[in-house]
Image (tube, helix red, strand yellow):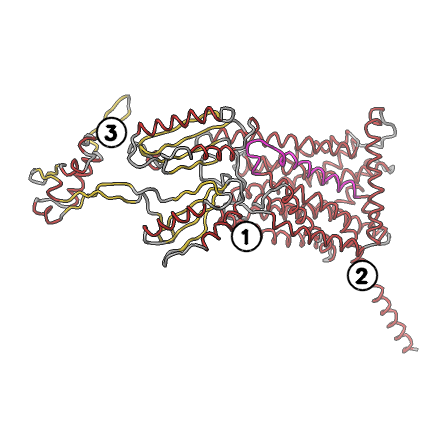
Amino acid sequence: MRGCPENILNTINSLVETVIYALLFVVLVVFVFLGRWRATLIICITIPLSLIASFIYLAVSGNSINIVSLSSLSIAIGMVVDDAIVVLENVTTHIERGSDPKQASIHGTNEVALSVIASTLTMIAVFFPLTLVSGITDVMFKQLGWMMCAIMFVSTIAALTLTPMMCSQMLKKETTSSKLFLIFFTPVNRGLNWLDVVYANLLTWSVRHRSIVIISCSLFFVASLFCMKGISTEFFPAQDNARIAVELELPIGTRTEVSQSLAQDLTNLWMTKYKDELRVCNYTVGQADSDNASASMQNNGSHVITFNISLVNPEDRDKELSLICDLMRDDLKGYPEFSKSQVILGGTNTGIANQASADYEIYGFDMLVTDSIATELRKNLLTVEGVSEVTISRGDYLPEYQVDFDREKLALHGLNLSTAGNYLRNRVNGAVASQYREDGDEYDIKVRYAPEFRTSLSNIEEIVIYNSLGQPIRVKDVGEVIEKSSPPTIERKDRERIVTVSALISGAALGDVVAGGNKVIEQMDLPQGISIGISGSYEDLQESFGDLGVLALLIVVLVFIVMAAQFESLTYPFIIMFSLPFALSRVLLALFMTNSTLSVMSLLGAIMLIGIVVKNGIVLIDYITLCRERGMSVVLSVITSGTSRLRPVLMTTMTTVLGMIPMAISTGQGAEMWRPMAIAVIGGLSVSTVLTLVLIPTLYCVFAGTGLKYQRRKLKQDNEMQTFFAGIHR
């Protein structure tokens, strides 16, 4: 755990910087689109108000400001302004048309209130199920889900109450503009007006060529699915925390002086070769004392060398942590003295963000057979592309002395097994005879034979045991001392003996290495009673992917229910749901183009897209319905609503995308963890928004046209029936 506080602080500082950049991007987008500093100020006030809700949750729940909570803020910044933007843009439109600011605030808010509430409920339907996830992903997603729910709820309340109030007091129709305003915003307004015209023409063409639009979008979706073959899978991306651990083993029995000399040579080599990357390099050598419980539980001995290396921060060096680890492994190949070597990225093998490994568990009772299989598997795994080193969990057999007491001889000398064993243990390990007191502290005084009288076979044979009569009996007179070798540990799982072979992965994805490892195992001839199973990170990956798949299905159902209640129809939610497959298409394309992997974090980004994409569709369909209620035709309603909602949809999309960009391009410590999620959201939202603005209106025309034909046909049938019955009555 050395250096963990420093790593956590560096990661938090990196996330704080990401949050600040995201906030600046969001404010800039609002200012450019609206061109009003007062309107921008209103948005700026709603952001901290919404984010305060997250801190209230942290205080009430007893959680702290940590990596997950700060990441939640970074994700939320681009979303908390969505509702306020929709309300503000609609109110601004009414004011520009000549309405009184107070009346514009009332009518503008009422027009979009239902769509704002529905879109927020869809977002809550996305994030609330994250609080129900179990397993290892529960550690990260539970706090994220609760924080996002609290933030979205407060942002909606602020958008429907605070934003209209501030609009009524601060906004007015601007009749004159400053020279600086005209210089800067005239090109911006021309560009936005040109975009309105282009989109109106595109939408007009799309609703009149519906088949072409639908077929083209379908072909795009099918083509994007082929990208799945080029996307690998992994559990979590490895995180650059600027720490490396190196564990080396020499042949058992190597003197401490030899181990220390080699450790010093390596230290000098690495501190010279990687002087621009390494900050501290320290090592430990030797046998841990039996009183040191923590050190005794770790691998130690005169033949064991352990390095703890601290590097400079990722942004201050050119080489990645994984590359430095690979170079160190190459350096160790020049030392044939080491029987085992392991370079551990991140300083520990535990944790979800450390270097991935493919773990294979070999089940079998016969330890000699399983040792042979493990050695063969290790040799074969080293041929798999992406495997940098392979370790076997069962260490080298340790030499030990075993005393086989003869019970009959013990009885003849007036001894029993317990008494003889206690005497032997006290002579070798020692017994506490008294305590030494100094300054109020007590220290055990342990008495045992000196090393030169207890370390060889003949020494142990000469150890004296006293019986109840005080007669001395030597160990060799009542038993036999045998030198044997035994495994340091015997691992068990499901009541079976196992040995784990771990393939450390570098420069490849977990899924690819596991696939290569499975091919290797298929070619091995396993004896009867021996089996090999996959475990570790890949087992966690499969469990997490399964949980997130069920979660995504639940979220889709919840979102559909929310929209069905909002529109009081099953048709409109069905239309909006058509945007989800295309969001998935762009996620796959984004991961493929950026050479990213499909991990738990990128899946989280895809799940978040369900709510974000649906929000834009709800705003669009709701305004189309409003235009239909005002007496417009289907095509005119679609075109009018599309051009009217274009800017707020683009604003909400850009605030979310630009809010994610700092997370996607950050190079600070811990950035690798959240980057895949940001890439998935940016890629999926950028294309799905375009398709939402084109495909959703087109599908609306298709379903509305079918509905009108059905209504006309039914009305015609009703008129014919009325005419028929009227003729009968005559």
Pinpoint residue 341: horizontal percent, then vertical percent.
40, 37
Start and end of the magenta stretch?
Answer: 645-673
Rounded to the nearest angstrom, the CA distance separating label 1 from label 3 is 54 Å
Q: What residue type is disc 2 on?
A: Thr
Q: Are marks 1 and 2 in contact (CB under 8 Å)?
A: no
Residue 111: which quarter of the image? Answer: top right
Q: What residue type is disc 3 on?
A: Asp
Q: Is residue 212 magenta?
A: no
> Element at badge 1?
helix
Whether 397 is drawn above or below 313: the answer is below
Q: Residue at x 91, y 76 (%)?
A: 727
Pinpoint residue 130: horizontal percent, then vertical percent.
57, 46
**Residue denoted by label 3:** 444
Q: Earlier in the sequence, mark 1 or mark 3?
A: 3
> Element at badge 2?
helix
Asked whether 40 or 499 is in front, the reply is 499
> Element at badge 3?
strand
Residue 31: which quarter of the image? Answer: top right
Task: Name the quadrant of the N terminus.
Answer: top left
Q: Is residue 646 magenta?
A: yes
Task: Name the quadrant of the C terminus.
Answer: bottom right
Q: Residues within 10 Å of mark 3 (few under 14, many from 20)?
A: few
Q: Nearer the viewer, mark 1 or mark 2?
A: 1
Asked whether 58 or 132 is in front, the reply is 132
Q: Nearer the viewer, mark 1 or mark 3?
A: 1
**Residue denoted by label 1:** 546
**Residue denoted by label 2:** 706
Q: What residue type is disc 1 on?
A: Gly
Residue 672: which quarter of the image? Answer: top right
Horizontal side of 42 relative to 631 (left or right) equals: left
Q: Residues within 10 Å of mark 2 (few under 14, many from 20)?
A: few
